[in-house]
Amino acid sequence: MNLTLKVWRQKNADDPGQFETYDAADIIPDMSFLEMLDVVNDQIIAAGKEPIAFDSDCREGICGTCSLVINGTPHGGQKATTACQLHMRHFNDGDTITIEPWRARPFPVLRDLVVDRGAFDRIIQAGGFVSVNTGGTPDANCLPVLKDDADLAMDAAQCIGCGACVAACKNASAMLFVSAKISHLGLLPQGKVEKDRRALKMVAQMDKEGFGNCTVTGSCEAVCPKEISINFIARMNGDYAVALLKQGA
């Protein structure tokens, strides 16, 4: 396959940035998208130029660092697929592919396709944890959990914090991410102890970071590589309202 890439290049956070065009020649269809970028970078380095900077780690759809907007869609638009799991066979020979970083004020571009997602880390630090003393690890059958609650908690826990939901939302809302983190802890017995405080603190930090509000367009759910449901946003809103009422009492 021979492709044309239009890649966002930006030297640093203060640079205005621009698109630059590269040829991706002799690309094997079974390559992943990031492997294709590796090949292009080898060609760029061989020409004595600066390679394209992009984030990656596990390359197995687990870590969430492969934050790329591909042809206008976070992670490339394949259902339940991260950029590192996207294969070149989904493109056609001769295609032109546009590659950009996440576009959201709380995710400032550091260089080329790399953004600072520290805002998510600070939201987790505000309350996305269980700090109560739960003792040693109990046997699985010692702490009864309703199956529906356990299933929901596991669904929410699949969130890898990639930020695609923010990148896809016209408001740059982080509510799908935050609701998943609040829900997967709040649904389980160990997390219920701090449920109210967690909701208040994480939502407050989300607002402080400058993320927008949810207007229920569903764009976040559509691009989420782990298919997190927007129903968790409704659950978080309920948890937050109850916590506010308790705080006022």
Image (tube, grey):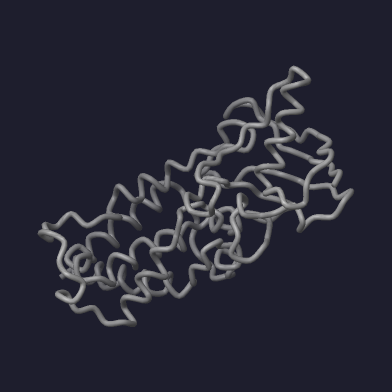
Q: Which quarter of the picture shows residue 121?
A: top left
Q: Count up the numbered dots.
A: 0
Query: In screen coordinates, is 129 left or right of 212?
Result: left
Q: Residue furthest right?
A: 94
Q: Which quarter of the picture shows residue 87?
A: bottom right
Along the viewing direction, whichever of 31 and 55 lies nearer the viewer: 31
The answer to whether residue 186 is above or below residue 60 is: below
Along the viewing direction, whichever of 157 and 139 lies nearer the viewer: 139
The answer to whether residue 227 is above or below residue 133 is: below
The answer to whether residue 209 is above or below residue 221 is: above
Query: In screen coordinates, is 168 left or right of 249?
Result: right
Where does the image place residue 66, in percent across and percent down from the top left? 57, 46
Along the viewing direction, whichever of 93 and 185 lies nearer the viewer: 93
The answer to whether residue 225 is above or below residue 33 is: below
Residue shown at 50% from the left, 52% from the top:
162
Residue shown at 86% from the left, 43% from the top:
2
Residue shown at 34% from the left, 74% from the top:
238
Where does the image place residue 26, in percent across and percent down from the top left? 83, 40
Where does the image place residue 164, in percent across and percent down from the top left? 56, 55
Residue shown at 40% from the left, 59% from the top:
178
Along the viewing direction, whichever of 16 and 141 lies nearer the viewer: 141
Query: In screen coordinates, is 138 left or right of 124?
Result: left
Q: In which quarter of the image is the C terminus?
A: bottom left
